[in-house]
Amino acid sequence: MLTIKQQQNKALVALTDGKKVGEVKDLYLDQDLHAITAVLVGTEGLLNRKARVIPRSTVEVLGVDVWLAKDSESIVDLTTLNEADTFVLANDLRGREIQTEGGTKLGAVEDVLLDDRGNVLGFSLGKVYVQGPLAQRKMITRAVITNIGSKDAPMTTILARAEESQILDLSANLQGVSLTEQAKG
């Protein structure tokens, strides 16, 4: 399992010629927070800042040490991608509150948890305001989020579903226990 923080500053290398084409500065997610849509490699322009990205479709491998892109020409202006205006920058999720549909604060997003293909599994929580399984795990799966909120509005979930759901126990996986080992034990 990967976290967004772990991916930042990783080198992006072209498969065709081995050339370093940039570094992962941040990741864009789709509007429903299900998967990576693009990799932010930087911005250009002093007055009219433009995000330079590599579309997820051109990233072949999300490696341990580097990410591999199809070629060194993969970098494009974010605005050239379909539905780019709906993408969510992963860093913008940090600190976003998560609450029940009734308004009880549960916690705040610290990081985004990904699988090895770039799909969003859930969120690690930096602050947890409730006791119980959610407080012990300090994680919530994406599947139990009922509304992703916005910059000004919290994510929502149903507490019972949030406490019951887990991805084989995310906390053990983040501590280095593989999914295979969890399934055996």
Image (tube, helix red, strand yellow):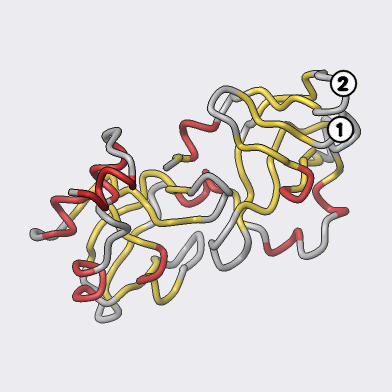
Name the residue at 77% across, 41% down.
54
Of the numbered discs 1 and 2, the one sitting upstream in the chain is: 2
Q: Are marks 1 and 2 in contact (CB under 8 Å)?
A: yes
Residue that numbered label 2 is attached to: 17
Mark 1: amino acid:
Asp
Q: Nearer the viewer, residue 114 or 77?
A: 114
Q: Few, some or many C-alpha atoms within 10 Å of disc 1 (few <14, some 14-19, many ≥20)? A: some
Q: Position of residue 97 (x, y in %)?
A: 34, 59
Name the residue at 26% across, 67% down.
165
Name the residue at 35% across, 61% down.
141
Q: Residue furthest bottom?
A: 102
Q: Nearer the viewer, residue 2 or 181?
A: 181
Up/down of 24 relative to 141, above or below:
above
Up/down of 92 relative to 131, above or below:
above
Q: Position of residue 89 (x, y in %)?
A: 60, 49
Q: Nearer the viewer, residue 88 or 75?
A: 75
Mark 2: amino acid:
Asp
Q: Few, some or many C-alpha atoms within 10 Å of disc 2 (few <14, some 14-19, many ≥20)? A: few
Up/down of 22 relative to 157, above or below:
above
Q: Secondary structure at mark 1?
A: loop
Instruction: Determine which of the numbered discs, if any, sits on residue 71 in the image.
Output: 1
Left or right: 113, with 158 as reference point: right
Name the residue at 63% across, 61% down.
30
Q: Total number of numbered labels? A: 2
Left or right: 6, with 98 as reference point: right
Quarter of the rendering occupied by the N terminus = top left
Q: Position of residue 9 (x, y in %)?
A: 59, 24
Instruction: Determine which of the numbered discs, if any, sits on residue 51 in the image.
Output: none
Q: Nearer the viewer, residue 44 or 48?
A: 44
Left or right: 185, with 146 as reference point: left
Q: Residue furthest left?
A: 131
